[in-house]
Amino acid sequence: MVLLSRVPAARDLVPGLGVFAGPLGILLLAVGVALALARTWQWRIRVSMPPTWVLFAVPAVIASAVGVRYVSQVEASGDEIDYLLMAQSLWREGDLDLRDNFARGDHLEYVGGLDHMPGGTHRADGRPYPTHSAGLSLLLAPVYAVGRRKACVVFLSLVAASLGILVRDLARRAGADEEAALVAWAAAVGPPVFFYAYFIYTEVVVALVVALALRLLLSSPGVGGALLAALALSALPWLHARMPLTAAALGAFAVVRLRGRARWVFVAAAGVMAAAYLGYQHAVFGRLTPLASYGGTVPIPMAHRTPGRTLVGLFLDRGFGLLPYAPVFLLGLAGLPLLLGRRQRHRWAYALAGLAVLLPVLAWKNWWGFSPPARFTVPLVPVLATALGVRLAASPGRGLARWRWPLVAGGFALALFMSAEPRAMRMIGARDGPPKAFEMLGGEPSLSRYLPHLSSRAGTTQPPWGPPAAEGRVAAVCGAGLLGLLALDRLARSRDGVDRWFRGLALPLLLFLAVSVAVDRWARAEGDAAPPPAAGDGARP
């Protein structure tokens, strides 16, 4: 493959070979050599579970180091500015009236050059108010007081490390063995969670709350556990307006699951917290709805952003999808039928959590944004990582399970590469162009050519700014390849002949070549050039 990528005649016939003419080709050779040596010397890697403190400390230290370096060099951006200014206002004045904070320049501590105060909506009395929920800022207020923005990313790094521990326990409870639970832990602390340990958004905290609620409710808690679960779920609406459905779904599961005094304590605590939240919404906005800050309605997607397109984009989009940046979650998708199957006692808890997190995103206006990849799939990590552990436990040495550690390593390596030069902003999803990381790693053409760009406005000159038809065709090709791979994995669990395809590089390389030929000959046969972004559609909203 690497040699053919440098032969003009071969690249004319199969342009996708050019991807391996860059650093990816060197990586491919290294993986090939490692596989050959492993076969020749019959290496066997036996992994044992490290102590819990190690599993907590390692990701916390790495994420904190990367995060502190990032915030030392790059200004806050996007929603981060709102959350930080709200945290300052809560700590210094005990309110969410940001006018005085903006007037005296509190935001200059982390961003300069703002020409208007962050806002987006108004209170019932007409005063400006942030669109975003106040829960994260309330958590960060004392943290910001201690060490400003650097302390905030250290705090989020600790949250991400805690999420990994909870996911490991969930995977064990679902039937994963020691190594499978360790892979689930690695998936949970790697990308995309890793990115949001140093970007100040709500996603990692939401994922931790979902994981904590699942962990408590699935362990037959007593009164204390039921109370903690109620408080955890009650925190979700305060973190984001998309989260009340998740709180309600897991709350309904808790009412069915719990017994005796634990059930009544849960109902009472959750009821009081729900009343307090709705009372707050009414007092501030004059509306009894979690969507009050959005005018009482869901921010409806533009015409071309249908739920189906959004669902594909959440997993495959080249700038904002999950799998291009965290390929280990292929195993999570493969494990979902097992996690939600009849043999799993707690399948309804995971089904409700996954659907409740996903459904609001499918109806949301902007599942993309000025943020790292896979922002809106971060709260799904507890479910997907647990499914990953179940898949590995079912057939630990067959099919996709053979790729578990290379997939983990590949995701971590890409995340560290994207974070290596903070000012280059490689970790930011590309709204109107190819991702910088993919452009640097691949040859010509770029690897990003073979992934759909479903969040783009490029290719049209009039509303609704629908992406060109080519992106839909690329999505169809990639989706077919993904479904085919998952089907082969299912067969490999029981058929030696199919499992043999997963023992080397033949299957992934042939699959990539098939996708690239389909894209070049059909999906992008007429090219994918697009006009430049319209004025006002730049990188920083």
Image (tube, rainbow, N blue to C red):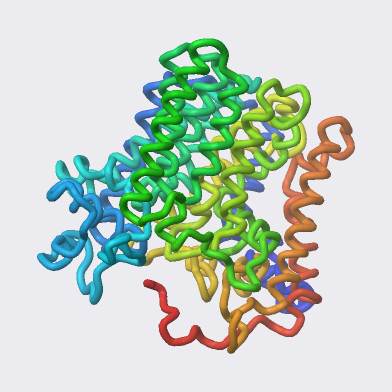
The spot of residue 386 in percent (x, y) is 60, 31
Query: Could you tell me which residue is drawn at 70 percent across and 35 percent down?
Result: 335
Name the quadrant containing residue 424.
Answer: bottom left
Query: Camera-side residue: 102 or 97?
Result: 97
Query: Could you tell me which residue is drawn at 53 percent across and 20 percent down?
Result: 48
Numbered marks: total: 0
Q: Is residue 84 left or right of residue 238?
A: left
Query: Could you tell me which residue is drawn at 37 percent across and 72 percent down?
Result: 540
The spot of residue 514 in percent (x, y) is 80, 62
Query: Camera-side residue: 435 or 101?
Result: 101
Does residue 531 sit above or below 334 in this rendering?
below
Does residue 102 sit above or below 397 in this rendering?
below
Report whether residue 143 is seen: yes
Query: Camera-side residue: 85 or 335?
Result: 85
Q: Could you tell me which quadrant the C terminus lies in?
A: bottom left
Q: Is residue 368 left or right of residue 234?
A: right
Name the quadrant containing residue 517.
Answer: bottom right
Q: Could you tell me which quadrant the N terminus lies in?
A: bottom right
Query: Could you tell me which residue is drawn at 70 percent across and 68 percent down?
Result: 17
Report whether residue 187 is seen: no
The spot of residue 60 in percent (x, y) is 35, 36
Query: Camera-side residue: 9 or 482?
Result: 482
Does residue 84 sit above or below 11 in this rendering?
above
Q: Is residue 167 left or right of residue 138?
A: right
The spot of residue 387 in percent (x, y) is 65, 33
Work out which residue is located at the far left of the displayed protein and give it: 104
Does residue 146 sit above or below 511 in this rendering?
above
Q: Is residue 232 left or right of residue 140?
A: right
